[in-house]
Image (tube, grey):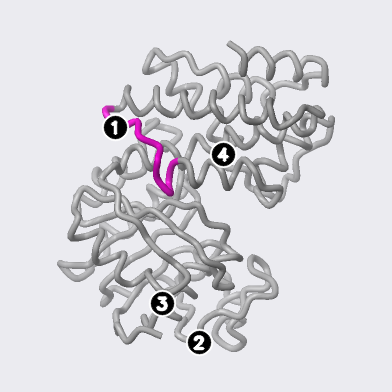
């Protein structure tokens, strides 16, 4: 265990927030995990567990569940749904953190009202450039269990990124620096849409040729969005190809599973958040705004937004992939 003795606030006690907290705790940080659920707070503090989101995982003993924010911290990790990001950013702006506190945006998504990336919303609301973006490929349970993993820490400031990397790295977890903040964010959003498409190819009984074609099409659409937003279109990174591979190839991915369910005529679990389903609609809106043609993203959105037959789904997917 490292002896860093940094104080870290993690906002969001879902699977990923808890996994990040446990990783940081095992690395020697004093972690304050902001929890809204009183029963969950008790479970974390008394049993070092989050049975709702990370069953069969024992969390670091260096985690203390708290209500609200602790402001005397060196780092703040923001791990909330994208729909809650502006509200959380506003609370951060209203909290008196230390001048040199580093913020890490772990949330992935686009703000629905403005179609802005979360880093842009953060800068607008918090008026700080002292931040980085953390982006996979990471399944929460595997990170919490110490499975060898890599991740991307993207920031305009190499110094800020180095500070974040220093508290994340250990023998089984390596963070890689990228200056491509917007590109990392775009990959983090669109890879979930591609994963839904890949799940649909599985549900339709196609082979890996079709899945590979779907991934290729999706990567090209990521690059088109990046270019339109003035970001690097290089996807040879953990946040790029790494996260795309993870999400599109594994049945552990909720978005991949959703695509398979829809293609087989099933219904989505209303108690599960499918980031790709939300992202598909927002990316389609962004495409219109940027005057882009994104066949795969728009096909996934059309399928999810309409009660299509399996034959119709098959036609939409094939047309989108092969255009």
Q: CA distance from mark 4 to mark 3?
A: 29 Å
The residue that label 2 is drawn on is 61
Q: Which residues are magenta?
A: 230-240
In this view, the residue farthest toward the front is: 209
Specify the principal SS of the magenta part. Answer: loop
Which of the image's four quarters has the N terminus? bottom left
Whole-percent x, y for residue 245 in the image: 56, 43
Q: Quadrant of residue 268?
A: top right
The residue that label 1 is drawn on is 231
Residue located 35% across and 37% down the image:
183
Who is closer to the viewer here, 123 or 295?
A: 295
Q: Quadrant of residue 269?
A: top right
Q: Contact (CB < 8 A) between labels 3 and 1?
A: no
- Residue 225 lies left or right of residue 214; in this view the side is left
Q: Secondary structure at mark 3?
A: strand
Q: Secondary structure at mark 2?
A: loop
Residue located 74% across and 13% down the image:
315
The residue that label 3 is drawn on is 32
Q: Contact (CB < 8 A) between labels 1 and 4?
A: no
Whole-percent x, y for residue 43 in the image: 62, 81
User: Mark 1 or 2, which is nearer the eye?
Assistant: 1
Q: CA distance from mark 1 to mark 4?
A: 19 Å
Q: Secondary structure at mark 1?
A: loop
Earlier sequence position, callout 1 versus callout 4 = 4
Q: Contact (CB < 8 A) between labels 2 and 3?
A: no
Residue located 67% across and 68% down the image:
52
Whole-percent x, y for residue 303 in the image: 69, 22
User: Mark 4 or 3, which is nearer the eye?
Assistant: 4
């Amino acid at each position: 265990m490292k002896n860093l003795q940094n104080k870290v606030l993690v906002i969001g006690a879902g699977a990923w927030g808890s996994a990040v907290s446990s990783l940081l705790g095992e690395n020697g940080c004093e972690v304050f995990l902001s929890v809204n659920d009183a029963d969950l707070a008790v479970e974390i503090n008394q049993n070092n567990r989050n049975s709702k989101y990370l069953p069969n995982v024992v969390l670091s003993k260096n985690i203390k569940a708290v209500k609200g924010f602790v402001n005397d911290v060196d780092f703040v990790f923001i791990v909330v749904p994208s729909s809650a990001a502006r509200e959380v950013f506003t609370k951060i702006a209203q909290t008196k953190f230390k001048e040199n506190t580093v913020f890490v945006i772990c949330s992935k998504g686009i703000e629905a009202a403005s179609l802005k990336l979360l880093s842009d919303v953060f800068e607008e609301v918090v008026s700080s450039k002292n931040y980085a973006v953390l982006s996979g490929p990471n399944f929460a349970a595997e990170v919490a269990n110490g499975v060898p993993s890599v991740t991307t820490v993207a920031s305009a400031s190499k110094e800020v990124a180095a500070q974040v990397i220093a508290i994340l790295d250990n023998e089984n977890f390596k963070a890689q620096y990228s200056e491509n903040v917007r590109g990392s964010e775009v990959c983090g959003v669109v890879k979930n849409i591609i994963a839904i498409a890949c799940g649909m190819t599985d549900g339709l009984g196609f082979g890996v040729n079709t899945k590979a074609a779907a991934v290729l099409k999706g990567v090209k659409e990521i690059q088109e969005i990046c270019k339109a937003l003035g970001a690097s279109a290089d996807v040879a990174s953990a946040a790029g190809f790494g996260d795309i591979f993870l999400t599109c190839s594994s049945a552990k991915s909720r978005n991949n599973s959703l695509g398979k369910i829809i293609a087989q005529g099933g219904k989505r679990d209303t108690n599960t958040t499918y980031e790709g389903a939300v992202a598909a609609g927002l990316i389609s809106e962004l495409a219109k705004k940027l005057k882009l043609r994104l066949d795969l993203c728009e096909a996934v959105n059309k399928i999810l937004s309409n009660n299509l037959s399996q034959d119709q789904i098959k036609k939409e997917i094939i047309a989108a992939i092969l255009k």
